[in-house]
Image (cartoon, rainbow, N blue to C red):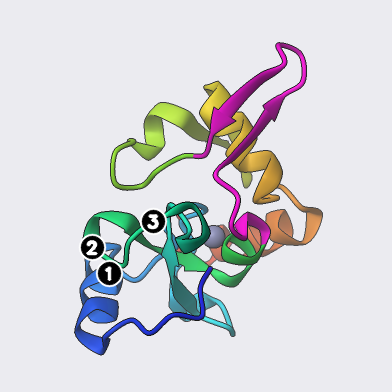
């Protein structure tokens, strides 16, 4: 999340590279009224740069829930774990689907799904509707 200026060409590159879908929850920008935004994976606050390697395409829900955070705590182990990084991680190694629910396979998946609120009831319902229409995932 950032208020910094990102050149239109860079925004286009990020959107096209992501195939116009949120790189975290996989919803297509066209299926969100608010579309998707260009997100700093490592926020500016923490020294992240406005470069293709540090940018991701994210829907409003993922973007706002992430904020400037970099990760969270796994309370059962007390460990600080970073979020899923679309530039270095493979989605299927950290998440999978049980119907419209996004299950997590790793600690990285777990903190990301929890803080980004992947399985908020309204988002599950939204995915169910999109799945029935063959628009997701
Ligand atoms: Zn998303």
The magenta-colored residue range is: 65-83
Quadrant housing residue 132: bottom right
Q: Secondary structure at mark 1?
A: helix
Given this view, does label 3 or label 2 mark the residue nearer the observer?
3
Q: Which residue is mark 1?
A: 14
Residue at the image position 53 percent from the left and 68 percent from the top = 1
Question: Do labels 3 and 2 touch, CB within 8 Å?
Answer: no
Q: Is residue 100 visible?
A: yes
- The answer to which of 115 and 125 lies nearer the viewer is 115
Query: How far across and down, in percent of the image, does residue 26 sit?
Result: 46, 56
Given this view, does label 1 or label 2 mark the residue nearer the observer?
2
Q: Secondary structure at mark 2?
A: helix
Q: Which residue is mark 2?
A: 52
Q: Residues within 10 Å of mark 2 (few under 14, many from 20)?
A: some
Q: Residues within 10 Å of mark 1 (few under 14, many from 20)?
A: many
Left or right? Give the position of 129 relative to 137.
right
Question: Do labels 1 and 2 touch, CB within 8 Å?
Answer: yes
Queried whether the magenta region covers residue 71, the answer comes back as yes
- Could you give the CA–CA distance between mark 1 and mark 2, rounded to whole angstroms? 7 Å
Q: Which residue is mark 3?
A: 48
């Amino acid at each position: 999340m950032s208020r910094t200026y990102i050149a239109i060409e860079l925004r286009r590159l990020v959107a096209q590279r992501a195939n116009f879908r949120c790189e975290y929850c996989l919803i297509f920008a066209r299926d969100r009224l608010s579309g998707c935004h260009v997100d700093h994976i490592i926020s500016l606050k923490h020294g992240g740069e406005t470069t293709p390697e540090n940018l991701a395409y994210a829907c409003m829900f993922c973007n706002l829930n992430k904020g400037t955070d970099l990760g969270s705590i796994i309370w059962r182990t007390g460990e600080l774990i970073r979020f899923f990084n679309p530039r270095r991680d493979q989605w299927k190694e950290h998440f999978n689907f049980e119907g419209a629910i996004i299950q997590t396979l790793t600690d990285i998946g777990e903190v990301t799904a929890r803080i980004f609120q992947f399985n908020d009831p309204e988002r599950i319902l939204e995915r169910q509707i999109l799945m029935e229409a063959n628009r997701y995932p």
